Amino acid sequence: MTFFKGLLYCILWYSSILAGYTTLFCPLFPLLFISNRLYRYITDIIFTFWQYYPTALLELFCGCNIQVTGDAIRTDEISILLMNHRTRTDWNFFWPTLYHCVEGKRKLAHSTKFLLKNEIRHIPGPGWVMQLACFVYINRSWKDDKKIFNQYIEYITDIKYKHSLLLFPEGTDFTEETKKSSDNYALKNNLPLYETVLHPKTTGFVYLTQQLLQKHSLDAVYDIIF
C-alpha cells in the first residue's frame, strides 16, 4: 500500500507539472514582452498555488504530519533560505513547510526560487517550468556563476522583486560518499567533522548576500533544518 501511494504521488506530481507547463506557462509567455512585472506576478501566483497541490498530496493522501517551528517567512521581504540536503527527495517536504510558515498579505503570490545545478533545467517538465518561473541555475564554475549571480541581482533589483531564494549550501545530498568527501576536506583544512551535515560551500552565498545588501535588496536570511 505504501509503495502504491508513493508511485501514485509521483505520477500525480509529474503530470501536474506537464499540464501546468503546456496549458498555463507557455500561453502566458508572450506577456513577458509586454510587462515583465505582470508576467512575474501571474506566474508566481500559479506556481504558489501549485505548491499547495503536492502539499495536499503529502498531508492528505500520504498522511504526512508536517510540523514547523521557528520564525515565519515574511512576504514583504526579499529573503535567502538556507537548507540542509539530507536526501534527494527532501525538497518535496519543503513545499508544505512553506505553506505552514509563510505569512503576509501577498502569501498567494510570494514565490520561492531554488538555486539549482544547470543540468536540471533540461528535465522535461520540471526543468522547463522552473526556467519560466525564474529559478536560478548555476554551472558550479565560479567564473560562470558569478555572471549568473550578477544577472539575477540586477534583475530583482530593477523590478524590486519580493521573493525567497532557496540555497543548498552543502551543494549535494547527504550520502556515505559525500560524507567521506566532507570529512576529508575538514581534516585537510583543520575543521570540525560533522555527523549529520556536510561542510558548506560558501563562495556563492557570501558573494550573493554581500551584493544584495549593497543594493538594499536583502531583508532576511533563514536557516531551515530538516
Image: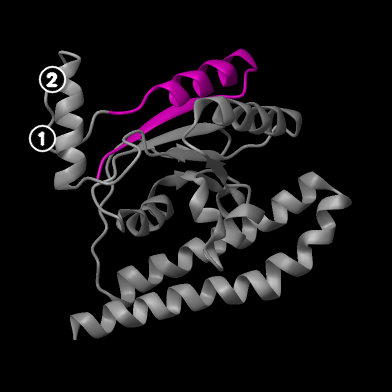
In terms of secondary structure, where does tag 2 sit?
A: helix
- Report the magenta residues as a range: 200-226
Of residues 167 and 183, the one drawn nearer to the viewer in this rendering? 183
- Residue sitting at 52 percent across and 23 percent down? 208
Q: Is residue 212 magenta?
A: yes
Number of residues whose C-alpha sits closer than 10 Å to that of mark 1, classed few (under 14), some (14–19) or many (20 or more): few
Rendered view: 135 above or below 62: above
Res. 187 mark: 2
Residue 93 is situated, as x and y percent measured from the top left of the image, at 33, 57
Three-letter amino acid code at disc 2? Leu
- Label count reads 2
N-term mark: 1 or 2: 2
In the displayed structure, would residue 91 be above or below residue 197?
below
For label 2, the crowd category at 10 Å Cα-Cα, with few meaning under 14, some 14 to 19 and many 20 or more, is few
Q: Position of residue 180 (x, y in %)?
A: 14, 37
Q: Splitting the image into 4 quarters, where does residue 64 fall?
A: bottom left
Q: Is residue 24 left or right of residue 178?
A: right
Q: Marks 1/2: CA distance?
A: 14 Å
Left or right for 187, reference 149: left
Amino acid type indicated by mark 1: Glu
Above/below status of 53 relative to 172 = below
Q: Disc 1 vs disc 2: which is toward the camera?
A: 2
- On screen, residue 185 above or below 67: above
Quadrant where the N terminus lies?
bottom left
Q: Which residue is mark 1?
A: 195
Give the residue displayed 78% in from the left and 60% down from the top. 29
Residue ID at (78%, 50%): 38
Identify the residue at image location x=55%, y=43%.
137
Q: Position of residue 106 (x, y in %)?
A: 60, 47
